[in-house]
Image (cartoon, helix red, strand yellow):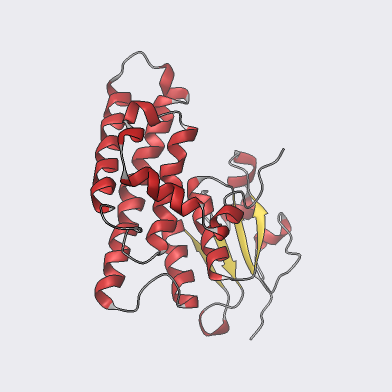
Amino acid sequence: MSNTVNHPITKRWPAQFPEKIQLYSFPTPNGVKVSIALEEMGLDYEPHLVTLSDSDVKSPEFLALNPNNKIPAIIDPNGPDGTQIELFESGAILIYLAEKTGKFLSTDSKTRYETLQWLMFQMGGVGPMFGQLGFFYKFAGAKMEDPTARNRYINEAKRLLNVLEQRLEGRDWIVDSYSIADMAIAPWLNALDFYGAKEVLGYNDLKNVPAYVKRFYARPAVAKAKNIPPRPE
């Protein structure tokens, strides 16, 4: 069944291929999770660049899709039972796409829940804590004279890196086979370079995490998806 996307967001971001999955995103760690999944799963999609400016994410058209005004979000005109589905929250989108395609989320109950466990580890831990690290180490928060907040997130990021370092001992991927957990976690590890925080976190003293990130970005689909939608020049 082939439907056509129908949503107010198309007034601002018109769909050239309305029969495809519509991706509204920006190439941040949260954003590229979904473009990576779409590429890895071989799904047809049309990307739309939604900048992080209020004029985009707080526009009436985008808020009609995501009232939480955050990227990424998708519309699949061929969703469950052939009906259109609109989704925000990158973790929810990854689960949906994995279930839609039957890829990168095991049907074995134990492995499935283990994968979801590590996906939630990223959603509730790595993402929020690394994001705060970036704010207090590189961006506006770095100007604060009081180091309390900065030190808090440095220490928490170190702790989370150690959790991953131990988890990856003897493993190529977070849950043995490559999965949506890796698509969620690895882009946030890569962001530490952008934040200029690798040295303060002792990142290069680790063995397993750097090798894992290198392995992840060597995947052809990841290499293609890491800048989708392309940043404006």
Which picture quadrant has residue 12?
bottom right
Residue 89 in view: no
Placement of the C terminus among the 4 image quadrants: top right
> Where 90 falls versus 188 (above or below)?
below
Residue 144 in view: yes
Residue 4 appears left or right of 184: right
Camera-nearest residue between 225 and 99: 225
Q: Residue furthest right?
A: 16
Which picture quadrant has residue 52?
top right
Q: Position of residue 112 (x, y in %)?
A: 31, 71
Residue 5 appears left or right of 181: right
Camera-nearest residue between 208 and 6: 208
Query: What residue is at 61 percent from the left and 39 percent from the top?
Result: 53
Q: How many marks?
A: 0
Camera-nearest residue between 6 and 108: 108
> Where 6 falls versus 49 (above or below)?
below
Query: What residue is at 47 percent from the left and 23 percent from the top?
Result: 140
> Where 68 falls versus 21 (above or below)?
above
Q: Position of residue 212 (x, y in %)?
A: 39, 50
Placement of the N terminus among the 4 image quadrants: bottom right
Q: Position of residue 176 (x, y in %)?
A: 32, 64
